[in-house]
Image (cartoon, helix red, strand yellow):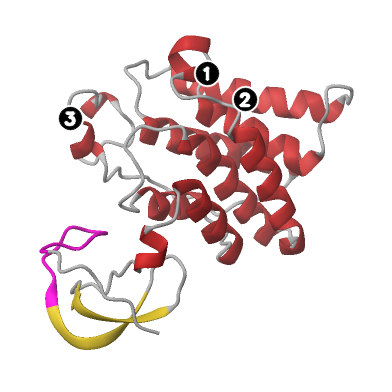
Amino acid sequence: MMIKMENLHNCFYCGDELIHSNRNLQTCLYCQNKFEAEEVCPSAHYVCDLCRAKPVRDLIFDYCLAFPEPNPVEMAVKLMKWPGFKMHCPDHHFLVPAALLSSYARVVKKKRKLRGWLEVAKNRAEKVPGAFCGTHGSCGAAVGTGIFISTITGATPLKTTEWSLCNSMVGKSLLSMAVYGGPRCCKRVTFLALLEAGRFVDERLSVRLNLPDKISCSFYQRNEQECLKEKCPFYPLM
């Protein structure tokens, strides 16, 4: 299989200068298929043209379905580094539940349910518009944690424990985000949402996801005007 890689000066993924590869086979970071490429990253980062052309939510869906792992933060960071993923956008509303569902499915050994879960989460997340945090007082990433809990528990408006769990989850996420104030940062709230959800399923469902001890944001330079810098818990120079 051969797809010509664009002759870029820098890596699409990490920004390092590309080098000539003499048409070596490269493995796509997202679909894991192999392609011939003339210009490659020294760190072996490669994103195929097929994955580059996917709509963001389709990429999230396909990646989380194909490569579930117990660390939702690592999955989210890899997806947010995809070149088509904007600094601020409603795609984070699906990213949060998708990464959590994928990690949860692996830990509880229910990968066979993952496709159905992701379809439910994608449909629900698409109903949460952009700027929801400022116009409705409920960040879409926080809503994403509620989508995650409601999906795995089968919550409905008429259920008792499940209804309580998903609303408690969103409440904890929002309070965690409100501590740091604005302006918005979709990366900051995504990290906070994933950490809160990881703690929540550990405490309430006795399921432990593999969360990192520390998160160091690599996106702050793309958010110069709105970044909280030293006031953000994920600012790398802290």
At x 59%, y 24%, the residue is 172
Q: Which numbered disc, 3 or 2, marks the residue that appears first in the sequence?
A: 2
Residue assigned mark 3? 224
Q: Mark 3 falls on what kind of element?
A: loop
Q: Which residues are magenta?
A: 9-19
What secondary structure prevails in the magenta region?
A: loop
Question: Of circles 3 and 2, which is in front?
Answer: 3
At x 47%, y 18%, the residue is 133
On residue 132, which mark appears? none
Residue assigned mark 2? 170
Residue assigned mark 1? 175
**As shown in the figure, which amino acid type bears the numbered disc 2?**
Val
Question: Of circles 3 and 1, which is in front?
Answer: 3
At x 35%, y 82%, the residue is 2
Q: CA distance from mark 3 to mark 1?
A: 25 Å
**As shown in the figure, which amino acid type bears the numbered disc 1?**
Leu
> Nearest the camera: 21 or 49?
49
Mark 2 residue crowding within 10 angstroms, few (<14) / some (14–19) / many (20+): many
